[in-house]
Amino acid sequence: RESWASDSSDSVISSGSDSDSNLYKVILLGEHGVGKTSLARIFGGVEDCADADEAGNTYDRSIIVDGEEASLVVFDIWEQDDSQWLQNHCMKMGDAYIIVYSVTDKVSFEKASELRIQLRRARQTEDIPIILVGNKSDLVRSREVSVDEGRACAVVFDCKFIETSAALHHNVKDLFEGIVRQIRLRKDSKED
Ligand code: GDP
């Protein structure tokens, strides 16, 4: 089962100097209203508490993926204010990115491509893990972006793809486990 994050030391065998090596910063990007906050709150396990501020938030939690613990800090701050500084900062600080669009909103899908291009520009030389997420898959009747379109876009942009429904909690766990796997894959290949 998933475990809650704690600030106590974990059992990671680290070299001492790099104690944060298993703590990954994951940034949510995407147009307003696509479901970033909903996804983040499910991850954080706080979706039912009404008093969370809408102004952006971070959620940290440890999850076990493939038998190994990983600590994620998920940043839902992209829309916190519209300062260029914050958005530039977001593009630089992440270890991994989740680019969200709504399958019911073609414009948000196009915006996701723009964000991918922006991110590539900001992190040119790096191979950072990115998952493209088509959220609101439960809204079958108002779908504007097909699964195939989403998948094709991910191929073009060389990233992973998943459709989720925050409303039904469908694939949300898979999404965050997927991001951990993507981070690990790159880390492992770098350590060779
Ligand atoms: P954000 O602006 O990207 O953070 O989007 P929010 O998480 O605030 O979601 C915007 C609206 O879409 C809210 O009313 C959510 O309840 C709704 N929403 C988010 N995810 C889903 C989903 O998977 N299915 C449906 N039907 N509604 C969703």
Image: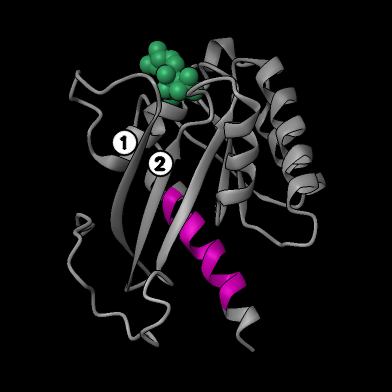
Q: Is residue 146 above or below residue 159?
A: above
Residue count near mark 2 (Cα–Cα under 10 Å), binned few <14, some 14–19, many ≥20: many
Q: Name the amino acid, label 2.
A: Val
Q: Nearer the viewer, residue 35 or 137?
A: 35
Quarter of the figure with the C terminus: bottom right
Instruction: Give the mark nearest the N terminus, 2 or 1.
Output: 1
Classify mark 2: helix, strand or loop: helix
In magenta, the rendered stretch is 176-187
Q: Residue 42 shows which numbered tag?
A: 1
Q: Name the amino acid, label 1.
A: Ile
Q: Residue at x 17, y 67 (%)?
A: 8
Judge left or right: residue 131 versus residue 69: right
Q: Residue 176 shows which numbered tag?
A: none
Q: Nearer the viewer, residue 84 or 161?
A: 84
- Indicate the quadrant of ligand 1 in the picture: top left
Q: Residue at x 75, y 47 (%)?
A: 122
Q: Is residue 166 above or below residue 154?
A: above
Asked whether disc 2 touches disc 1, contact meaning CB atoms under 8 Å apart, the reply is: yes
* View extreme (top): residue: 142
Disc 2 marks which residue?
A: 172
Q: Is residue 41 above or below residue 155?
A: above
Percent from the top left, x then y, of residue 170? 39, 36
